[in-house]
Image (cartoon, grey):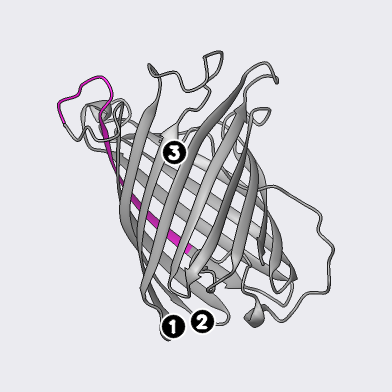
Amino acid sequence: MKKIALTSLLAVFAATGAQAAAKNVMDGNPLYMPKAGHFFSETSLGSQTNESRDWTLGERFGFGITDNLAVAVKTSMSEIGGFANYAWNEIGLDVAYRFVGEGAWKVDLIGAYEVGPMRAYHHNFADEDLTTYVWTAGMRAGYATKDWSLMARANFIYANSESFNWAYDDDMWANHVLNIGFGGFWRMSDYWSGVVTADYYKILDHYGKPEAAGSWDLTAGLNLNIDATKYIGAYVTKEINHVGKGNWEGQDGVGFGAKFGIDF
């Protein structure tokens, strides 16, 4: 599903000394939720799984409206084989509402809307013949302690050439996708934490019969806590595609990336 793995931008920020890991509010935990009145930013730079010379630069910037409600905007740019081949991929908006948050258990409702590409490779800005509108609705749940957390998510994704075209019989553009994901997070010390995620994308309509029926995106990373509100991380990614009935094939090589996150 995702041919280019968005992982992270390795950035340098003035380190003020790492705080105890249990005090970190921004450290790459997949169950992170900003507090009311706080902004957050996650900047990422990652290569393709099968071609490390091609990269994607992404940004997700958000705000905590309340302790249990956050909104964020995101966008990304990609380059293939040189700066002459670049694309501005998307502009998106997502909302997360935490309706279970007391204690260790966390449950979030997720909604997102995305338009892209804004400028495809060698095409005009917002070319109406290429533009796709993507809706996402889902849920994220997990259990978090001061030393580790586990997370699971499920999303239904719908894309079409018109923003409000819900038809299943649009053979040219309609695409219905089920995403199921899992994540684990471990605070190894005051400075270091590890994260792993696995996301499965199942194409539900004609695009998945059977050449691209589904794919797994796998990520493993190591984060360094700069202080209680900043972290940097390095990641590797792998993509495994369903290329036929009972036949799974991994992309050659692995993707590499880095991430910088801040809560302020």
Q: Residue at x 31, y 56 (%)?
A: 138
Cα distance between the residues tagged 2 and 3: 31 Å
Q: Quadrant of the C terminus?
A: bottom right
Q: Residue at x 53, y 34 (%)?
A: 4
Q: Is residue 213 above or below residue 60?
A: above
Q: Residue at x 25, y 19 (%)?
A: 172
Question: Which dot, 2 or 3, sits closer to the camera?
Answer: 2
Q: Which residue is mark 1?
A: 104
Q: Which residues make up the magenta segment?
A: 168-183
Q: Which residue is mark 2?
A: 145
Q: Disc 2 on helix, strand or loop?
A: loop
Q: Is there CB contact under 8 Å for labels 2 and 3?
A: no
Q: Which residue is mark 3?
A: 240
**Rendering quarter of residue 108:** bottom left
- Count neighbours of disc 2 (C-alpha within 10 A) and say few if under 14, some if 14 to 19, many if 20 or more: some
- Count neighbours of disc 1 (C-alpha within 10 A) and say few if under 14, some if 14 to 19, many if 20 or more: few
Which residue of the protein is positioned furthest toward the bottom in this rendering?
103
Cα distance between the residues tagged 3 and 1: 33 Å
**Rendering quarter of residue 13:** bottom right
Left or right? Give the position of 207 relative to 39.
left
Q: Nearer the viewer, residue 147 or 58?
A: 58
Q: Disc 3 on helix, strand or loop?
A: strand
Name the mark on residue 56: none
Q: Is there CB contact under 8 Å for labels 1 and 2?
A: yes
Disc 1 residue type?
Ala
